Image: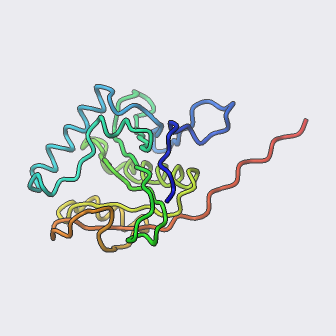
């Protein structure tokens, strides 16, 4: 069994580079603390939305405290011009289990795009950056659970190459959850040091 990460997630850039971030469509994606007030407010919107769709027993939510755990990588998407939060997402490094052929995996969690920012590709940017970070963390498999009524999320995941699979990670097969997997490519090798 692969041990869980015990050190904080670091940016994927070289150690002497500024904090790593992805940028596009006027949006930057970068690591942030999930206990920032604006993030807490966005997560509360997500929780309210999920509560409007599903009973509490069918909502498998990581709270802010759980998102601060060392095995979680939490990212935010911010408008590049204003700095306003427009989305967030995370992955949790999980040990292998029978349902994954004992391979460790990254579980995508807490994906949310602010309603005013939808249609700009923010969700896809967040998901792509999470996948890159999983690969950099040595993970070759991304898994997720989403609700059957979350049509926009299902469309995002399927367009990004995720395929339906059975339950994993102790989730119940309750008829409300959909389970997805995506094999990730090999991690990109670190760039060779430049020579003077």
Residue drawn at x 21%, y 44% as measured from the top left = 46
Q: Pinpoint residue 70: horizontal percent, then vertical percent.
A: 44, 39
Q: Position of residue 83 (x, y in %)?
A: 40, 28
The residue located at (15%, 58%) in the rendering is 58
Identified at 31% across, 64% down, the residue is: 155
As drawn, which residue projects farthest toward the front? 1
Relative to 157, 103 lies left or right = right
Return the residue nearer the eye: 174 or 184: 174
Image label count: 0
Q: Is residue 161 left or right of residue 59?
A: right
149 is higher (above) or lower (below) than 81: below
Name the spot of residue 124 as percent of width and height, x first.
41, 54
| Left or right of residue 4, residue 174 in this image | left
Q: Residue at x 54, y 52 (%)?
A: 132
Question: Eyeballing the image, is 44 above or below 154?
Answer: above
Residue placed most toward the observer, 101 or 140: 101
Farthest right residue?
Answer: 196
Q: Quadrant of residue 41?
A: top left
The answer to whether residue 148 is above or below residue 44 is below
Between 115 and 153, the residue placed more toward the observer is 153
Which color mode does the image show?
Answer: rainbow
Q: Where residue 152 sits in the image (x, y, percent)?
A: 26, 59
Image: 18 above or below 51: above
Q: Quadrant of the C terminus?
A: top right
Question: Position of 60 compared to 52: left or right?
Answer: right
């Amino acid at each position: 069994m692969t041990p869980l990460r015990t050190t904080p997630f670091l940016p994927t850039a070289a150690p002497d580079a500024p904090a790593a971030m992805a940028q596009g469509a006027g949006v930057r994606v970068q690591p942030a603390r999930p206990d920032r007030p604006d993030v807490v407010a966005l997560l509360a919107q997500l929780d309210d939305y999920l509560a409007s769709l599903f009973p509490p027993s069918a909502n498998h939510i990581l709270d802010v405290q759980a998102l601060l755990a060392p095995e979680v990588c939490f990212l935010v998407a911010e408008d590049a011009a204003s700095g306003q939060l427009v989305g967030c997402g995370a992955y949790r490094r999980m040990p292998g289990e029978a349902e994954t052929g004992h391979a460790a995996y990254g579980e995508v969690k807490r994906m949310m795009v602010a309603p005013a920012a939808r249609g700009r590709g923010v969700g896809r940017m967040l998901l792509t950056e999470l996948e890159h970070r999983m690969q950099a963390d040595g993970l070759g498999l991304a898994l997720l659970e989403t609700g059957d009524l979350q049509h926009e999320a299902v469309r995002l995941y399927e367009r990004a190459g995720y395929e339906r699979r059975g339950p994993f990670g102790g989730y119940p097969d309750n008829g409300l959850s959909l389970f997805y997997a995506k094999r990730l490519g090999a991690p990109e090798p670190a760039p060779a040091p430049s020579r003077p």
